[in-house]
Image (spheres, rainbow, N blue to C red):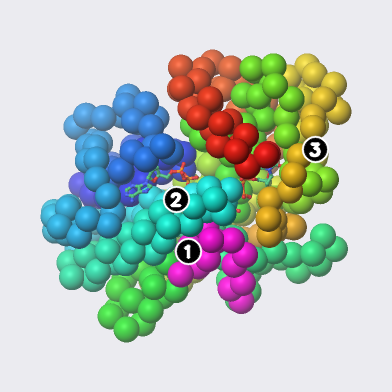
Amino acid sequence: MTRLVVTGGAGFIGSNFVRHAVANTDASVTVLDKLTYAGNLGSIEDLLGDRVRFVRGDIGDAELVDGLVRELDPAEDAIVHFAAESHNDNSLAEPRPFLDTNVVGTYTLIEAARRADVRFHHISTDEVYGDLEFDDPERFTEETPYRPSSPYSSTKAASDLLVLAWVRSFGLRATISNCSNNYGPYQHVEKFIPRQITNVLRGIRPRLYGRGENVRDWIHADDHSAAVLAILDRGRIGETYLIGADGERSNREVVELVLEAMGRPSDAYDLVADRPGHDLRYAIDASKLRDELGWSPRFRDFSAGIRGTIAWYRDHEWWWGPQKAAAEARYAELGR
Ligand code: NAD
Ligand code: DAU
């Protein structure tokens, strides 16, 4: 049986991937997660048992990481690296944890993978490419130059470059994927879509940064997980694959959709102070992933995906309720 070490497996996308791997492969999984404010054991508790083991720890702890990686069989096992400090607003307020986890943590993992000669998949973001103008006909491809804007995206860019250097200099058997904005169940309420849904559920008006014109390219987390499995299965070592589902929407369109789906007037939101350095637009060309690996998204109807996500938050206040006050207190300090 294949074994996977999944870092950040108690976070939003990592937990989705663990669920996906359990349902669609015969792999057993060790989740390594520090359980920062963003980690939640409640996202994977129902999976823990014979096939899924949880280890609480820091990816920067070389001794712990080495021990877990040495349990793996280089012939068939892999490390799938999701763990990160992931929120742009937090990186603008306090960059240091982003350097520790995203850069030094990734370095610690690839050193362990190199020593044990274990396959490594690095999860990254389209934000490493900076942003596009609203009217730019081009989208991001694997050839787009790196031009990160924020402390978060610059540390993710640094981690990608470390992985590429370890591939070239040390023969690390690694792949990288850069994905666009994810949505779906189990996303922390600090992020845009769950923040607005839980605001409406709590009787608070949604908040749009600036004029709400910025564009994000949305993909359901289930489709991200399926793409990562395809790359683990059939991806070429040393290659980067962009993951996206042709889901461009302005933030204003998304908030209007959420409000309408929740039975509120579509203009019942407030405009608030903009994020410093706010990227205008992201857009992914996922042709390489589609053509080489035969992946395509299952969630093609964004409105249906949003309605499903709203239903999940309605039914899972036990999961998000305890996070909400602290997340809003952080936003209050930022005036957003
Ligand atoms: P998240 O913030 O929901 O989860 C991150 C997880 O990592 C948490 O469980 C946290 O406890 C854990 N973690 C943080 N620091 C750690 C450390 N030092 N050691 C061990 N565990 C640690 O993040 P997410 O949104 O699920 O993102 C997961 C990955 O996907 C990240 O690498 C992110 O850059 C990437 N990504 C996210 C998106 C998105 O839209 N959310 C899009 C593209 C790529
Ligand atoms: O593109 C991939 C990236 O997507 C990932 O690498 C990041 O980990 C993930 O957090 C996400 O980054 P964004 O900064 O795009 O996501 P966020 O949810 O913070 O914001 C989405 C958009 O919504 C962005 O333009 C800012 C805006 N926004 C956000 C919040 C929280 C608002 O207008 N109002 C809000 O209250």
Quadrant, the C terminus: top right
> What residue would you read off at disc 2?
85
Residue 122 quadrant: bottom left
Query: Is disc 3 placed on a helix, strand or loop?
Result: strand
In-front residue for pair 235/135: 135
| Real-space Cα separation, disc 1 to disc 2, in angstroms | 9 Å
In the image, what residue type sits under mark 2? Glu
Picture residue at 57% right of the left edge, 22% below the top? 313
> What residue would you read off at disc 3?
271
Q: Is mark 3 within 8 Å of ligand 2?
A: no
Residue 111 quadrant: bottom left
Image x and y of residue 302, in percent: 70, 37
Of the image marks 1 and 2, the number of the one nearer the N terminus: 2
In-front residue for pair 225/332: 332
Mark carried by residue 52: none
Query: Is disc 2 placed on a helix, strand or loop?
Result: loop
Please state the extent of the stretch shown in magenta in the rendering. 145-158
> What residue would you read off at disc 1?
155
The reply, left or right, for residue 113 in relation to residue 39 is left
Image x and y of residue 189, in percent: 55, 32
Bin the neighbour count of mark 3 within 10 Å (Cα to Cα): few under 14, some 14-19, many 20 and up: some
Bin the neighbour count of mark 1 within 10 Å (Cα to Cα): few under 14, some 14-19, many 20 and up: many
Q: Is mark 1 within 8 Å of ligand 1?
A: no
In the image, what residue type sits under mark 3? Leu
| Real-space Cα separation, disc 2 to disc 3, in angstroms | 26 Å
Picture residue at 59% right of the left edge, 67% below the top? 148
Q: Is mark 2 within 8 Å of ligand 1?
A: yes
- Mark nearer the viewer, 2 or 3: 3
Membership of 151 in magenta stretch: yes
The reply, left or right, for residue 100 in relation to residue 135 is left
The reply, left or right, for residue 60 in relation to residue 263 is left
In-front residue for pair 336/259: 336
